[in-house]
Image (tube, helix red, strand yellow):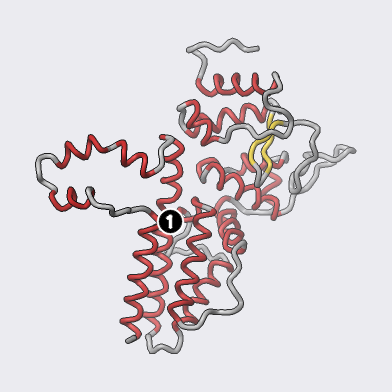
Amino acid sequence: MTEIDERTPPYLRIVGELRQRITTGELGPGDRVPSTRQIVREWGVAMATASRALTALRQENLVRAVPGVGTVVTGPEPVAPGRVARADRRGHPREVTRDQVVRTALAIADAEGLPALSMRRIATELDVPTMSLYRHVRGKEQLLLLMADAAFAAVELPQARPPGWRAQLELLCRLQWSIYRQHPWLAQVISLTRPLLAPRAVAHTEQALRALAGHGLDPHTQLHLVAALANHVRGTAVNLEREAEAEQDTGLTDDEWMAAQTEVLSGLFAAGEFPHLSRLTRSTVDLNVESLFEFGLQRLLDAAAALIGE
């Protein structure tokens, strides 16, 4: 076993400890190993260091990534659906499908965020040459488009619409919020001024415009209202990934973190320069991403009602 001391790079210390868990049987074939975020929390290292450690273990063929599951210890257990071998029994290269490429990219982004996503990383997970992926996607820009479309496709728009424009718009916004909840990275790639033309995402815009049709709004107002609602959902969802990373880095929930800042806040408010803010912090007001989403959504729908004249 490689000797580990304080001069050993952090990622190699992590590799050494996880390798020992595997070789001693503490982690057996098919068992999940710590994710990058778990490594960040357990060893107190940066996300890049955690990713490098898992990459080193994969290169040693000690672990492999299973889309939708995580990184597991290699072994004789059945290969998960969607995973392909680099070559068949006769040594001929095996081909992957576009769907496998997209699903693997989604699994990486969901587990580790967009910084961990690259064509090389996807090829490593699928055990194929990197250049073979370009037969299915032109590059990362198209890959993000396909990933966004797949994320929206996983949550189907209801065939039966609820009665009333307000209920229809609210339903759409809640569906979008649930998609961002499942894929926190998605808010980073969605743009309102240069939109990703993902057909399933465009379908949400079409549904929203249909809900407003026939209520006396001119095209300019309709489009801006729909964009404002979508931007509220996306703009609030931008905080989801940072919130998750902060919780992983500190090991504290938002409430626990705020409680730990009591002494700092007391010192900040002691001089009396912020009396209104001080009063609010002593009340039971609970501010979080969910409350921001709910409050903003209802106020925007109230504004839409005013425009419509209801």
Query: Regarding mark 1 in the picture, which secondary structure is present there?
Result: helix
Q: Nearer the viewer, residue 285 or 2?
A: 285
Please give the count of numbered marks on the rendered protein: 1
- Compared across the picture, whether 148 is left or right of 249 comes to right
Residue occupying the point 35% across, 65% down: 296
Residue at 43% x, 60% y is 234
The image quadrant where one finds the N terminus is: top right
Query: What percent of the width, then of the height, locates residue 69?
Result: 66, 43
Name the amino acid type tagged 1: Ala
- Quadrant in the picture for residue 94: top right
Q: Residue furthest right?
A: 90
Residue 32: quadrant of the picture: top right
Image height of 270 relative to 165, above or below: above
Residue pointed to by mark 1: 237
The residue depicted at 67 percent of the width and 28 percent of the height is 59
Residue 7 at what x, y percent from top left?
Answer: 48, 12
- Name the quadrant of the C terminus: bottom left
Residue 67 vs 202, above or below: the answer is above
Near-viewer residue (197 or 114): 114
Question: Neighbour class for label 1 at 10 Å: few (<14), some, many (≥20)?
Answer: many
Residue 155 rendering spot, x and y as whole percentages: 59, 64
Above or below, 25 against 87 in this view is above
